[in-house]
């Protein structure tokens, strides 16, 4: 018979999901750095692209230029949610939210199959309370979707290698990896699980997933996985390559080469951004990203070692895969904390069988209690230092900061140190709700760029032309007129001199640019607004100095562009 306590425990992950993930949905516009970019690309796809044919579903377009940093699958999903909802506020968050919920279901089901229903509930709860997982589930970035396809790939391979043979799931895993590569180039990461599996099979920990019958049949079945992977990628790449070849457009050829080579192999082997030391993830990411599981590592590590000593292949494959993913990203010079998000589901699965015992650890509860008090202190700091936020062009968060602190103190007082983990979980869930319902609406005008563009519109007479220097995608999303720019990757000096020539070529023209781009062409003046840690100035020919040379010879042609969310004219290139 199911007791009320068991029913409550089974419902707990769903309650945590509702409180942690849903508040704030649709209450914010896309925020930088990535969300406005992806939203603009998705909106352009839905609108049909520009007149030059770049804005197709095969070639993502950002403000009139091909966007080659990422493959198109996430943009397809965001465009689909925009078509379904008609709201960019919903559309930019829904793919990540739905991907996170699907990942939770996969983790719950795999834990149930590998262990039992109780462990499955622990696995879902651990994943849902993992800080980085919840943070990305609420974002409009790519990584939650990548994590879904990575988890589905790992799910299928583990169903086959540990519980199989299960050839259908084996093939599905490779198809999922193909979708993962179409989302972000590292979608092949589940393949790394074959290394610890081979080690376990060689030592008799796990019998190989044999096909049975004749050798040719086994070879054919194993080949189905790579064929599924290739078929998924071919469904995208072959039409893309044919489209580029038929166009004869050098810009599309450059897009193809950048996407397939520079943004994949070259970016990993010789990264040009986010350069960090090899130990960056261990010292600067995992301590906060894996919270609250991080607190349990002093007990988890010895317990995992004991299980490995007993020949537990389940733990070996999960922990070995996490270690290999961590090593894979650590070997690249370019590092971002979000790259490790795909390890969160495997971590939850590896920790779940030990969770019931860990819950009885008094010192672990004390650690949770201490972190809860740190959250309270952080809330008070946020409330007490509005000046720091003002320096970044953000409004004060005194109210939400006090609410964070009050919530944490109340949870700590109710649970006391002996149930410190309960206090921490309740505090985290409540803080996510406060962020969604209070912080999002408070910060949105500044973070989304709507406040900046409203200030610009208030200064500009109707019918005047506007150009952007040092622009970001949110300016187009929040703007209500056609704007001119010179490409996203044009050097700042070249861009500024091109803007000077554009000003001189017509009347009633203005340029919006950051303060750092004023010299030597424009005299300093009063900023029209502060946004995104920069002071933005609106200038015209009246602010031109005598120290500015003519337009740089290598400046690209200007691009006139209007956001597809508020487009009344098509954007085009001027010769």
Image (tube, helix red, strand yellow):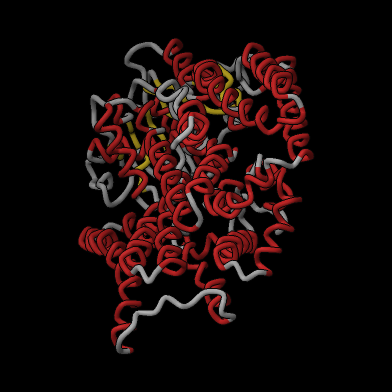
Q: Quadrant of the N terminus?
A: top left
Above or below, 573 against 236 in this view is above
Residue 236 visible at all = yes
Residue at 39% from the left image edge and 29% from the top image edge: 476
Of residue 448 and residue 472, the one placed in the foreground of this image is 448
Q: How many marks?
A: 0
- Indicate whether 350 appears above or below 9: below
Taking depth in this image into account, of 332 and 279 the one nearest to the observer is: 279
Q: Position of residue 20 (x, y in %)?
A: 51, 29
Q: In the image, what residue occupies the spot 44% across and 10% down? A: 458
Left or right for 250, reference 117: left
Q: Residue at x 67, y 52 (%)?
A: 281
Residue in the picture at 27% in, 26% down: 86
Closest to the observer, 196 or 325? 196
Residue 413, image x, y percentages: 73, 19
Tell me the quarter of the image containing the C terminus: top left
x, y percentage for residue 12?
A: 50, 32
Q: In x, y percent, where is residue 19?
A: 50, 26
Q: Is residue 232 above or below residue 415?
A: below
Position above or below: 368 against 293: above
Residue situated furthest front in the rendering: 1
Left or right of 546 on screen, residue 258: left
Residue 31 visible in this rendered orientation of the protein: no
Left or right: 187 in relation to 300: left
């Amino acid at each position: 018979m199911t007791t009320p306590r068991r029913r409550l425990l089974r419902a707990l992950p769903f309650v945590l999901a509702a409180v942690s993930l849903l508040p704030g949905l649709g209450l914010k516009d896309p925020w930088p750095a990535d969300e406005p970019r992806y939203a603009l690309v998705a909106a352009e796809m839905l609108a049909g692209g520009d007149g030059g044919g770049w804005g197709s579903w095969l070639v993502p377009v950002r403000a009139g230029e091909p966007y080659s940093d990422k493959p198109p699958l996430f943009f397809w999903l965001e465009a689909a949610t925009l078509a379904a909802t008609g709201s960019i506020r919903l559309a930019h968050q829904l793919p990540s939210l739905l991907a996170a919920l699907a990942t939770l279901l996969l983790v719950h089901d795999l834990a149930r199959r590998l262990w039992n229903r109780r462990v499955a509930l622990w696995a879902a709860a651990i994943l849902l309370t993992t800080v980085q997982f919840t943070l990305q589930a609420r974002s409009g970035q790519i990584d939650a979707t990548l994590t879904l396809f990575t988890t589905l790939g790992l799910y299928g391979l583990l169903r086959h290698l540990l519980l199989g043979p299960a050839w259908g799931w084996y093939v599905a895993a490779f198809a999922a990896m193909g979708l993962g590569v179409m989302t972000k180039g590292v979608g092949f990461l589940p393949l790394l699980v074959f290394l610890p599996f081979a080690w376990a099979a060689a030592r008799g920990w796990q019998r190989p997933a044999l096909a049975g019958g004749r050798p040719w049949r086994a070879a054919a079945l194993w080949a189905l996985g790579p064929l599924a992977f290739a078929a998924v990628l071919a469904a995208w790449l072959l039409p893309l390559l044919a489209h580029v070849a038929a166009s004869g457009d050098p810009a599309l050829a450059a897009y193809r080469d950048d996407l397939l080579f520079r943004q994949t192999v070259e970016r990993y082997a010789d990264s040009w951004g986010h350069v960090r030391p090899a130990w960056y993830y261990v010292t600067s990411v995992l301590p906060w990203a894996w919270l609250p599981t991080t607190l349990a590592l002093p007990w988890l590590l010895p317990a995992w070692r004991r299980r490995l000593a007993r020949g537990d292949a389940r733990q070996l494959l999960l922990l070995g895969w996490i270690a290999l993913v961590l090593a894979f990203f650590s070997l690249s010079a370019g590092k971002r904390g979000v790259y490790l998000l795909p390890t969160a589901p495997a971590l939850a699965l590896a920790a779940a069988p030990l969770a019931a015992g860990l819950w009885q650890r008094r010192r672990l509860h004390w650690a949770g209690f201490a972190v809860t008090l740190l959250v309270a202190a952080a809330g008070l700091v946020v409330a007490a230092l509005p000046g720091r936020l003002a320096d970044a062009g953000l409004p004060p968060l005194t109210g939400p900061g006090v609410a964070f602190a009050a919530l944490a103190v109340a949870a700590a007082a109710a649970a006391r140190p002996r149930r410190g983990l309960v206090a921490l979980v309740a505090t985290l869930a409540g803080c996510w709700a406060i962020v969604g319902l209070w912080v999002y609406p408070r910060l949105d005008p500044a973070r989304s760029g709507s406040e900046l563009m409203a200030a610009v519109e208030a200064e500009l007479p109707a019918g005047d032309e506007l150009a952007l220097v040092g622009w970001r995608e949110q300016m187009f999303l929040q703007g209500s007129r056609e704007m001119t720019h010179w490409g996203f990757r044009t050097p700042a000096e070249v861009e500024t001199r091109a803007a000077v020539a554009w000003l001189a070529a017509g009347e009633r023209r203005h340029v919006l640019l950051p303060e750092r781009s004023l010299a030597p062409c424009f005299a300093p003046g009063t900023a029209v607004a502060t946004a995104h840690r920069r002071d933005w100035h609106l200038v015209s020919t009246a602010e031109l100095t005598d120290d500015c040379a003519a337009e740089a010879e290598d400046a690209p042609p200007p691009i006139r562009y209007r956001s597809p969310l508020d487009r009344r004219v098509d954007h085009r290139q001027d010769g």
